[in-house]
Amino acid sequence: MEYTGIIIGFISFLAIGLYHPIVIKAEYYFTKKIWPVFAVVGIAMLILSLFATQVIISAGLAVLGITNLWSIGELIEQEKRVEKGWFPKNPKRK
């Protein structure tokens, strides 16, 4: 039996689960202006995935890279959710 697909699916599930609160906290503390960090990390992970020799590591890095890039859009959406009052606004920010 081949477990590679299940492992990659689990990595995807973990990435989505971990990045949801990361995006919320990043917007809370740094605003959406932190998006370049997500872009650089995402692109770096995608490049690293090209050079990984094992399928699971390559796929895991690619999933994390795409998740970082997807998080850029989620940062923008999170700012809108904060404006709507769905999430708390950082009182230390103007």
Image (cartoon, grey):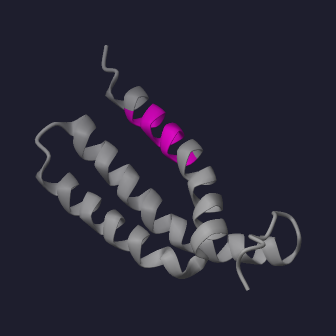
Horizontal side of residue 78 vs 42, given as left or right: right
| Position in image of residue 61 (x %, y %) | 30, 49
Horizontal side of residue 76 vs 39, given as left or right: right
| Position in image of residue 51 (x %, y %) | 11, 53
Q: Is residue 57 visible?
A: yes
| Position in image of residue 28 (x %, y %) | 67, 67
| Direction bottom: furthest residue | 94
Q: Is residue 74 visible?
A: no
Q: Residue at x 16, y 36 (%)?
A: 54
Examine the rendered structure and indicate whether residue 94 appears above or below residue 57.
below
Residue 2 occupies quadrant: top left
Q: Residue at x 46, y 57 (%)?
A: 67
Examine the rendered structure and indicate whether residue 16 appears above or below residue 40.
above
| Position in image of residue 53 (x %, y %) | 10, 41
Horizontal side of residue 22 vs 45, given as left or right: right
Examine the rendered structure and indicate whether residue 33 appears above or below residue 4.
below
Q: Residue at x 53, y 81 (%)?
A: 33
For the N terminus, which image quadrant? top left
Work out whether residue 21 or residue 5 is closer to the camera in this orientation and state it: 21
Horizontal side of residue 62 vs 36, given as left or right: left
| Direction right: furthest residue | 85
Work out whether residue 72 or residue 59 is closer to the camera in this orientation and state it: 72
Q: What span is colored magenta in the figure? A: 8-16
Majority secondary structure in the magenta region:
helix
Q: Residue at x 33, y 64 (%)?
A: 41
Residue 4 occupies quadrant: top left
For the C terminus, which image quadrant? bottom right
